[in-house]
Image (spheres, rainbow, N blue to C red):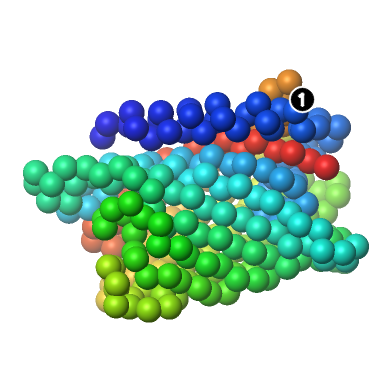
Amino acid sequence: MNPGPWRRTCAACCAATLPMLCTTAQAEMSAEELAKLAQNPVGNLVSVPFQNNTNFNTGPLSGTQNILNIQPVIPLELDKDWNLITRTIVPLIWQPEFLPGQGSTFGLGDIQLSAFLSPSQPGEGGLIWGAGAILQMPTNTDDVLGNKNWGLGPTAVVLKLEKGNPWVYGVLVNNVWSLSGDKQGGRYNNFLMQPFLNYNFPGGLYLTSSPIVTANWEADSDQRWTVPLGGGIGKIFHIGKLPVNTQLGGYYNVVHPDDGANWQLRLQVQFMFPK
């Protein structure tokens, strides 16, 4: 794999974003509090994660796929009781060749936008939840990078985050159905579940596991599921006053389609702007 294009794209995005972010970032929270806030998918926190997923042994030729997800999270305060949390996933994909001589492909995949309605204050015992909708947009720049049919479905998240408790755990789920099936890529019906479990140490260091379980309901039953197991480590750093959440993890797909990857290396850098 030639990683040059996606590395240059990531560097350009960082260079364009960092100057603006550094002027607004605050570092008044402790590193442990920042780590736990970053682990809340519907936290009242503006953040810009750059999550890079390298998938090994992908496709019939066992190539290496790379997906850089740029995932800005923007909370909107509706009133004193409710927030609307928007989460966008912009995927930049390096796709290996699936046929000899086909060549690899780099470009933009299909953007997904999620919106969660969530109470502004945690419930009893630190219970936090959010529910809403997810929209898939046909933004791919090449046929092999996505689908040209729009998609829509429900999404929800629930987690436990108690002050003084080092554990943060929960699950995020969604299902996206195509709104039509007559364009490139055809009909789709895709499920995603991401359980997450984190243990936080003083100083912003933490252990994490957040496998992404997916199902393609349109596929044959023996080609439907991808089920990873694994975990990693994370740490809060600061660039000046700007908090940065970093993560490194590895996941093995104990179940996957015939042409699906069997290993994934995940690296994330998340720029945080706590209020």
The residue under the point 76% across, 57% down is 76
Quarter of the image for residue 206 reads top right
Quarter of the image with the C terminus is: top right
Quarter of the image with the N terminus is: top left
Which residue of the protein is positioned furthest toward the top in this rendering?
240
171 left or right of 106 in image: right
Disc 1 secondary structure class: loop
The answer to whether 101 is drawn above or below residue 86 in the figure is above
Query: x, y percentage for residue 57?
Result: 26, 46
Q: State the residue in front, 133 or 38.
A: 133
Query: x, y percentage for residue 149?
Result: 37, 70
210 left or right of 91 in image: right
The answer to whether 42 is drawn above or below residue 26 in the figure is below
The answer to whether 198 is drawn above or below residue 155 in the figure is above
Query: x, y percentage for residue 167?
Result: 73, 50
109 left or right of 203 in image: left
Quarter of the image for residue 23 reads top right
Question: From where the camera sits, is residue 36 visible?
Answer: yes
The residue under the point 68% across, 31% down is 20
The residue under the point 40% across, 30% down is 7
Quarter of the image for residue 132 reads bottom right
Which residue of the protein is positioned furthest toward the left in this rendering?
101
The residue under the point 28% across, 68% down is 185
Q: State the residue in front, 153 or 13.
A: 13
Amino acid bearing label 1: Lys
